[in-house]
């Protein structure tokens, strides 16, 4: 984490861990609980949210991934999946830790591994929802970052996941 706060400008796309991908529409002063602060007003697909300007460097918000970072993420997606723990509590902890981490790499590795588990043993409802949420956010980020249609991203994503299943487990680490 850098010491210098992130600064976003009107028109920037950001990723919020809870509210998803949105575009900064303005910087506004708002009074909440009697305290006046500056906020980024962010328009997401189906909602609007505010991020305090002085909190923009925390782990809940990050800039949209660059095309280079998206391409790196896609390479990870093609790697052999890692076997997930058989204990659902350990899997749930990994999902929670990953979603709170906010790192694109962690999200990609988790999606790849959840997909492999889905094909092997199936997913419980929490795992299915986590996979859908991460996938939806990543596809939108990929689409925006590289300027491609979201359906094209979805098709490529599904193909890459399928290819990762054809690699012997942990072959990348051998």
Image (cartoon, rainbow, N blue to C red):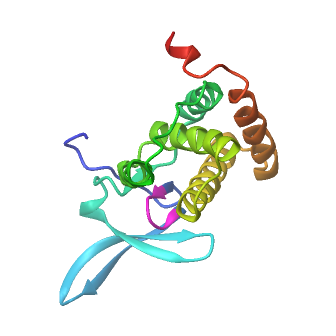
> Can you give x and y, in whole percent of width and height, for residue 46 in the image?
62, 76
**Vertical order, 7 against 147 (above or below):** below
Q: Give the residues in magenta.
A: 15-20
- Quadrant of the rendered structure where residue 49 is? bottom left
**Vertical order, 96 against 74 (above or below):** below
Q: Residue, x 68% and y 21% (percent of image)? A: 167
Q: Residue, x 28% and y 54% (percent of image)? A: 58
Is 128 colored magenta in this rendering?
no
Is 148 on the left or on the right of 142, as rendered?
Answer: right
Of all residues, the one furthest to the top in this rendering is 174
> Can you give x and y, in whole percent of width and height, for residue 43 in the image?
54, 71
* Foreground pick, 30 / 135: 135
* Foreground pick, 38 / 82: 82
Of all residues, the one furthest to the bottom in this rendering is 34
> Can you give x and y, in whole percent of width and height, for residue 3 in the image?
19, 42
* Foreground pick, 100 / 15: 100
**Vertical order, 49 against 9 (above or below):** below
Is 91 on the left or on the right of 157, as rendered?
Answer: left
* Foreground pick, 150 / 100: 100
Count of numbered marks: 0
């Amino acid at each position: 984490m850098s010491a210098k706060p992130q600064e976003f400008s009107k028109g920037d796309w950001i990723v919020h861990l809870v509210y998803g991908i949105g575009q900064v529409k303005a910087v506004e002063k708002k009074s909440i609980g009697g305290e006046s602060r500056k906020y980024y007003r962010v328009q997401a697909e189906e909602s609007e949210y505010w991020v305090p300007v002085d909190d923009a460097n925390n782990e809940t918000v990050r800039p949209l991934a660059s095309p280079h970072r998206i391409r790196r993420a896609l390479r990870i997606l093609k790697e052999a999946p890692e076997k997930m723990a058989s204990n659902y509590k350990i899997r749930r902890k990994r999902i929670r830790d990953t979603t709170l981490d906010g790192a694109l790499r962690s999200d990609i590795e988790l999606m790849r591994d959840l997909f492999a588990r889905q094909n092997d043993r199936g997913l419980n409802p929490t795992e299915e929802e986590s996979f859908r949420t991460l996938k939806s956010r990543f596809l939108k980020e990929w689409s925006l970052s590289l300027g491609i249609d979201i359906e094209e991203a979805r098709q490529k994503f599904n193909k890459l996941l399928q290819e990762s299943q054809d690699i012997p487990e942990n072959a990348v680490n051998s």
